[in-house]
């Protein structure tokens, strides 16, 4: 059994979304088909994403597009109790009032909490799903927030900004760790999902590096997927972008 999903589903996710260079997307597709035949509710959802076309999976996998079949797979995933399928059904337009009332999960919030737990534990696919919940404002429906209850568009915009920023800031701060030695850095990056502020002694840095503030890194259990460097002092502000994700950037 995989850590977050079944072995077949986790392998399929790796082939379809992560290891694109290996060109094993079709193999991942077959694994999802096998998992569906075995009654894996999450596999139904992920197989549906393959059939929705290039908005959901890489065009280079050459998956056959079939939106009607995909909608049925998503529906079955929800009815089989998949939290992943429930959240993705909101994005695919399959989720409606009737399905929400008929699904075995108690609520959309229950599905959100399940996927959030997996995301916080380090699963990248679930992190993407949670990100989409906020990017597309699905959290309004999940949290039963009615925009019409706010006085104006400006009030609504302010509410969204303040609450999203608050949630993101609280999440980041609750999962940020400081490492002052290489042992602390390796222990944290291997054992604790979240973020790390890392420093090393100034004498180990070049003069150019000594003038740079310290960076914050998103931890990943697979260290080979992300390079990281440490700097002389802790940065007080936060940054994202290619400089932190592209190891070739100077």
Image (spheres, rainbow, N blue to C red):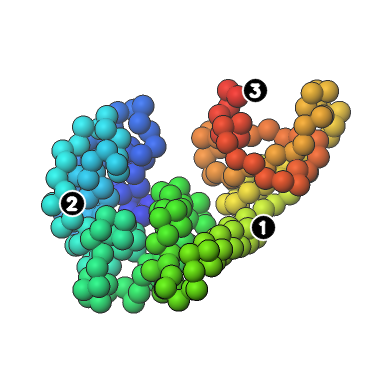
Q: Which mark is drawn over residue 173?
A: 1
Cα gap from disc 2 to disc 3, whole angstroms: 43 Å
Left or right: residue 106 compared with residue 179: left
Left or right: residue 158 compared with residue 93: right
Left or right: residue 17 compared with residue 39: right
Instruction: Estimate the x, y position of residue 208 in percent, counting from the top left.
Output: 79, 23
Residue denoted by label 2? 70
Quarter of the image holding residue 89?
bottom left
Indicate the quadrant containing the C terminus: top left, top right, bottom left or bottom right.
top right
Label 2 sits on a secondary structure element that is: helix
Residue denoted by label 3? 250
| Position of 227 relative to 216 (above/below) | above
Label 1 sits on a secondary structure element that is: helix
Q: Callout 1: 10 Å neighbours few (<14), some, many (20+)? A: few
Cα gap from disc 3 to disc 1, whole angstroms: 28 Å
Sequence-first disc among 1 and 2: 2
């Amino acid at each position: 059994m995989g850590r977050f999903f079944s072995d077949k589903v986790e392998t399929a996710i790796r082939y379809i979304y992560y290891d694109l260079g290996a060109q094993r997307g079709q193999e991942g597709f077959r694994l999802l088909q096998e998992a569906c035949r075995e009654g894996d509710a999450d596999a139904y959802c992920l197989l549906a994403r393959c059939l929705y076309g290039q908005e959901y999976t890489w065009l280079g996998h050459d998956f056959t597009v079939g939106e009607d079949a995909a909608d049925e797979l998503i529906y079955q995933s929800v009815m089989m109790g998949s939290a992943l399928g429930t959240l993705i059904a909101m994005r695919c337009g399959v989720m409606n009032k009737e399905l929400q009332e008929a699904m075995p999960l108690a609520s959309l919030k229950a599905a959100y909490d399940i996927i959030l737990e997996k995301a916080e534990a380090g699963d990248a696919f679930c992190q993407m799903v949670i990100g989409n919940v906020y990017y597309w404002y699905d959290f309004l429906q999940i949290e039963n927030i009615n925009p019409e209850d706010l006085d104006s568009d400006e009030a609504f915009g302010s509410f969204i900004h303040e609450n999203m920023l608050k949630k993101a800031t609280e999440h980041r701060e609750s999962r940020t760790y400081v490492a002052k030695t290489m042992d602390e850095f390796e222990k944290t990056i291997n054992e604790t999902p979240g973020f790390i502020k890392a420093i090393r002694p100034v004498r180990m840095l070049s003069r150019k590096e000594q003038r740079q503030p310290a960076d914050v890194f998103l931890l990943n259990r697979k260290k080979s997927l992300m390079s990281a460097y440490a700097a002389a002092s802790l940065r007080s502000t936060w940054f994202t972008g290619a400089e932190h994700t592209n190891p070739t950037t100077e």
